[in-house]
Image (cartoon, grey):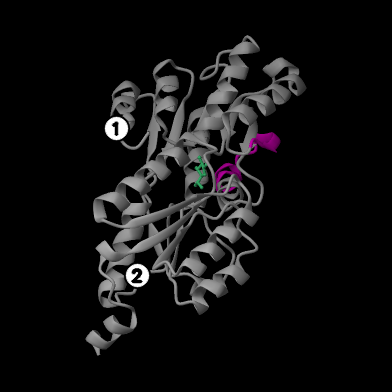
Amino acid sequence: AVALTGLMAGSALAADMTVGFSQIGSESGWRAAETTLTKEQAEKRGIDLKFADAQQKQENQIKAIRSFIAQGVDAILLAPVVATGWDQVLEEAKDAEIPVVLLDRQVDSSDDLYLTAVGSDLEHEGEVAGQWLVDNVGDKDCNVVELQGTTGSSPAIKRKAGFEKAISGHDNIEIVRSQTGDFTRTKGKEVMESFLKAENGGKDICALYAHNDDMAVGAIQAIKEAGLKPGSDILVVSIDAVPDIFLAMAAGEANATVELTPNMAGPAFDALEAYKNDGTMPPKFIQTESKLFTQSDDPKAVYEEKKNQGY
Ligand code: GYE
């Protein structure tokens, strides 16, 4: 029965595998590293990777998936830009018996439409960030501005919810402004400039929560240009742990980040190889770690380490 399952699941060895990867784009340093590591992992394993950059557009991702299906790839990796609107194309992949593995973001579709999802607990990340703030402001009143990720993306939705959960019950902490910065440095800076203007030149802002480090890095620039000190006048907490946020931390300009590994492809290919070789069904969710880093974690040393990890 075991051998039969293996046969039914297809007996392609890893070396023969062709995998299509529909990537969102390169909005952040984290995402660029994920792309680099996915290509590296594929090469190491002898996997033929077909890469498609969707430039932030779901319609481009849907087109890429259809083209992968038409080419008869052995599997598809999908980093879904938004959470909704995937049912139809995932059904098409399923009908073609091509397993789909979700990377780093999640979809609202039923979980029988994909093989597994590799990613972090996005809500937990938001909670860790919020808890850091709760632990560090004490009883002081604290007006928070929030830079959200891409509208409709699972990390934007869940990181917001997690943070709100952590600060709920702490009436001294309040989110006074919240807007999307699309996970980019440029937008992070631009939106932060408008927050600063609206909040008494920034004097009424106690903390910034950014859904990723890149937006925080852009916002840090805006805070400095407004004549305030990021990291002390305005506390900065964000998510990803990209190298540049550790430089900011070393300079005292950022306070905390929650680490997200850019190596989502390693566990994804492990799961696909096992599935292809002997029909092993992976769990529906393969969770990566979320670790908090602060200024006391030797940010300069972490920066050096990070630079060699796909960034
Ligand atoms: O945190 C952000 C990115 O989807 C979880 O997307 C990922 C997020 C990541 O561009 O930097």
Residue 177, given in percent of the width and then of the height, sits at 71, 34
Disc 2 to disc 1: CB gap under 8 Å: no
Closer to us: 168 or 146: 146
User: From the viewer's perspective, is residue 168 above or below residue 113?
Assistant: above
Amino acid marked by disc 2: Pro
User: From the viewer's perspective, is residue 17 above or below residue 191?
Assistant: below
Asked if the stretch drawn in magenta spans residue 171, the answer is yes
Magenta stretch in the rendered image: 162-181
Which quarter of the picture shows residue 233?
A: top right
Q: Which residue is mark 2?
A: 282
Residue 138 visible in the displayed image: no
Closer to the observer: label 2 or label 1? 1
Residue 49 visible in the displayed image: yes
Q: Which mark is residue 293?
A: none
Q: Which residue is mark 1?
A: 308
Which quarter of the picture shows residue 164?
A: top right
The crowd level at tag 1 (other Cα within 10 Å; few <14, some 14-19, many 20+) is: few
Residue 305, given in percent of the width and then of the height, sits at 28, 30
Residue in view at x 34 percent, y 26 percent: 303
- Name which of mark 2 and mark 1 comes first in the sequence: 2
Residue in view at x 32 percent, y 59 percent: 269
* 144 lies left or right of 281: right
Asked if the stretch drawn in magenta spans residue 105, the answer is no
- Cα separation, mark 2 vs mark 1, equals 29 Å
Amino acid marked by disc 1: Asn
Closer to us: 181 or 211: 181
Residue 51, given in percent of the width and then of the height, sits at 45, 51
Closer to us: 104 or 141: 104
Residue in view at x 63 percent, y 9 percent: 227
